[in-house]
Image (cartoon, rainbow, N blue to C red):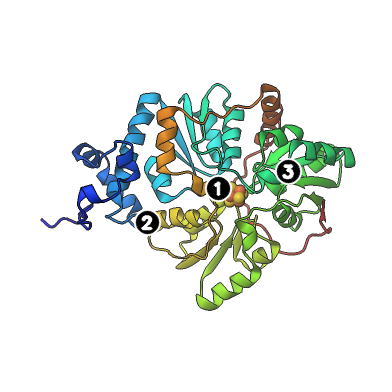
Amino acid sequence: MARIIEFGQGCDIPAARRRPTAAEARGLAYDAEVKAAVDHLYPKVKEFVTPMEWPAIAPFVHAINMLKKQRGAVILAHNYMTPDVFALVGDFRGDSLQLAREAARTDAKIIVQAGVHFMAETSKILSPDKVVLIPDLRAGCSLAASVTGADVRLIRSKYPGLPIVTYVNTTADVKAECDITCTSSNAVQVVEHVAKKWGVDRVILIPDEFLAKNVAANTHIEIIAWKGRCEVHEKFSGEDVRQIRDAHPGVIVLAHPECPPDVLEEADFAGSTSALAHYVKENGPKKVVLLTECSMSDNVAAENPGVEFVKPCNLCPHMKRISLENIYDALLDMKHVVEIPEDIRVRAKAAIDAMLALPKPTSFPKFRIGDPAVPVEVI
Ligand code: SF4
């Protein structure tokens, strides 16, 4: 019978002359035990990992899965993780809020956050009794870095009596100073809820300027925005969309609401990462482009083999700091433990709980396109 895949057969450099792989440097080999345990997983990543690369990856997958069992740990894998992390070692997959909810629900005592630091903090906020590990402390976020708790206190002193909503992409310190959190799935709902509850027609929505402007186009509430940007989504432009349409007639353009408003004006659909994945699954477009982080396209493509993906995407350098190598190291050495001072954690949790108390949307909301009813003030 013909062998479909011959892993590792393409390289004939003598072992003594080639540099050890990252796995070999840690004493992990692609041996018979590893082959038996994980080779069946290869089809999940065959579009992204060549047969020649697999022997360098498989030992990590096996070692991570063994360590998870030994330690009673789970891995939360964000949609922007590379397919090897997302599909091969992630126990729960999704957007940041879905992952934090799973963190709170799971019986596992140890959580490894395959995502960025504010996500690990959100997991810790909701799961104070669990050990939360982030494999690389440098996995930050341009949005989370754009605002501090001290900034929020200043905003509150300048706009007394107005509710402050924070997107979940912020530090625990910032969440602790805000009244409620939101995600890109429920931002319009949260803004309208707090305006009604506080009896006001203006709401402060931080830190993403573009999300705030896109929300403003979908509500009658006046929005005051902060000048934070996602360094991945701010790079897209309406002109990019027109060029993609010229080069790929008939392509369906899906955009994340952290993109500038002129991108959403040119797109066919805009929504959160979960909404974009849902759109592809439900509608099965022939050809699609996801204007968001690159690995998201790879992960959605792996689950929708009949759909052609055009990929003019942007990489998030912070998400890309997380790898199989440092997930293995994190589980082996139990590093880096995420800690939050209890008073900040409790106040940050109150802001998240206020959002979680709202009815869960029954469908994925689409961002309508257009100019805000009231111009957005950016502070
Ligand atoms: S994609 Fe943007 S919002 Fe997400 S972690 Fe990277 S910089 Fe932050």
For the residues marked 2 and 1, what is the alpha-carbon distance in whole angstroms? Answer: 20 Å
Give the camera-side residue of 245 and 176.
176
Which of the 4 image quadrants contains residue 244? bottom right
Above or below: residue 111 compared with residue 43: above
Cβ at disc 3 under 8 Å from ligand 1: no
Which label sits on residue 48? 2
Q: Residue 307, percent across and down? A: 42, 63
Q: Residue at x 60, y 34 (%)?
A: 122
User: Which quarter of the figure is the N terminus placed in?
Assistant: bottom left
Badge 3 local density, few (<14 within 10 Å), some, or many (20+)? many
Cβ at disc 1 under 8 Å from ligand 1: yes
Residue depth check, mark 3 versus mark 2: number of the one nearer the observer: 3
For the residues marked 3 and 1, what is the alpha-carbon distance in whole angstroms? Answer: 17 Å
Disc 1 target residue: 318
Residue type highlighted by circle 3: Val
Disc 3 target residue: 147
Give the camera-side residue of 95 and 230.
230
Counting residues from the start of the chain, the first of labels 3 and 2 encountered is: 2
Q: Residue 71, percent across and down? A: 39, 25
Which label sits on residue 196? none
